[in-house]
């Protein structure tokens, strides 16, 4: 499974990238607002840090304006992935952009039928929102499983990018089902390493080592 981090915080991205854990980054208008920066400048800085896809989202809702904004965002760096909403205009723009060789992340997916349409439009990534589906009283992981089955049935190349992840259990479940990518908030990504038995074991090893009076090297 690929790990993307869901943030526009350059400091967090640099830290995680230095750990060797990042395959890409996803941003959205809300994250850009939280960063306090200009979308073009922030996206450029992120692209300079990370080698993998960096999703930058258009804010237009009409096809021709989406294409205009996508053209501007595409010029930031070669690894920019244009993020489009799952609407008819968004799917039309997706088809046009992927046909010209651009990466596209179709976002705000809440049903398997929507994911099927995105794959038909040639999306590079489809972003089903697990947490928000859970909020509706529906099991978000069932959506991931449905999309996985449909994509496997027809050998679609679109990668399932599990989004709106809120817990480490979401990551585990998405991996078990076979999501290609998980885009994870920084704090949740860091929490994947934690386990009380790991902490306890390390504490014991260090205590025993201190009793030996030895040093390595």
Image (cartoon, grey):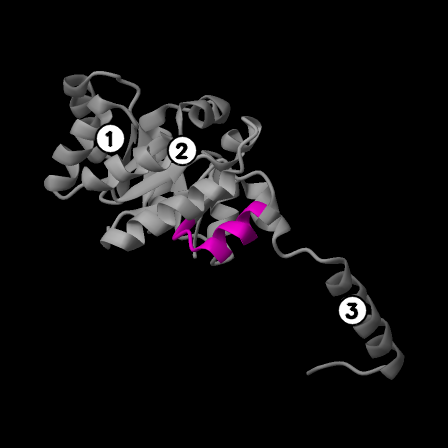
Q: Position of residue 189 (x, y in %)?
A: 56, 48
The residue indicated by pointer 2 is 27
Which quarter of the rendering shows the C terminus? Answer: bottom right
Q: Position of residue 1 (x, y in %)?
A: 43, 57
Q: Please name whichever residue, 77 or 214, is drawn nearer the observer in this view of the structure.
A: 77
Q: Check residue 174 for magenta coloring.
A: yes
Distance from the alpha carbon under mark 3 to that under mark 1: 48 Å
Task: Give the quarter of the image for residue 202.
Answer: bottom right
Residue at the extreme left: 100
Which label was assigned to residue 145?
Answer: none
Q: Please name whichever residue, 66 or 31, is drawn nearer the observer in this view of the structure.
A: 66
Q: Please name whichever residue, 131 or 77, is drawn nearer the observer in this view of the structure.
A: 131
Q: Read off the magenta span.
A: 170-181
Q: Is residue 128 visible?
A: yes
Task: Give the quarter of the image for residue 128.
Answer: top left
Mark sitting earlier along the chain (3/1)? 1
Are the residues tagged 3 and 1 within 8 Å (C-beta)? no
Q: Position of residue 131 (x, y in %)?
A: 53, 34
Which label was assigned to residue 73?
Answer: 1
Q: Position of residue 100 (x, y in %)?
A: 10, 40
**In this view, the mark in front (3 or 1):** 3
Mark sitting earlier along the chain (1/2)? 2
Residue shown at the point (48%, 43%) measured from the top left: 142
Residue shown at the point (26%, 44%) measured from the top left: 124
Residue shown at the point (18%, 17%) measured from the top left: 65
């Amino acid at each position: 499974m690929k790990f993307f981090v869901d943030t526009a915080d350059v400091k967090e991205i640099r830290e995680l990238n230095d750990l060797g854990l990042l395959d890409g980054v996803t941003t959205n208008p809300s994250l850009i607002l939280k960063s306090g920066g200009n979308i073009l400048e922030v996206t450029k800085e992120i692209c300079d840090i990370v080698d993998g896809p960096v999703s930058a989202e258009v804010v237009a809702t009409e096809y021709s304006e989406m294409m205009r904004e996508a053209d501007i965002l595409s010029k930031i760096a070669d690894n920019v992935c244009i993020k489009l909403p799952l609407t008819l205009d968004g799917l039309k723009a997706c088809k046009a952009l992927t046909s010209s060789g651009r990466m596209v992340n179709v976002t705000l997916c809440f049903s398997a039928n929507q994911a099927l349409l995105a794959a038909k439009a040639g999306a590079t990534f489809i972003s089903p929102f697990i947490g928000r589906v859970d909020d509706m009283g529906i099991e978000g992981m069932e959506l991931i499983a449905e999309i996985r089955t449909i994509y496997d049935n027809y050998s679609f190349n679109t990668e399932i990018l599990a989004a709106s992840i809120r817990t480490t259990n979401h990551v585990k479940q998405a991996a078990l089902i076979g999501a290609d990518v998980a885009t994870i908030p920084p704090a949740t990504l860091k929490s994947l390493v934690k386990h009380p038995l790991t902490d306890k074991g390390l504490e014991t090893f260090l205590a025993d080592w201190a009793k030996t009076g030895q040093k390595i090297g």
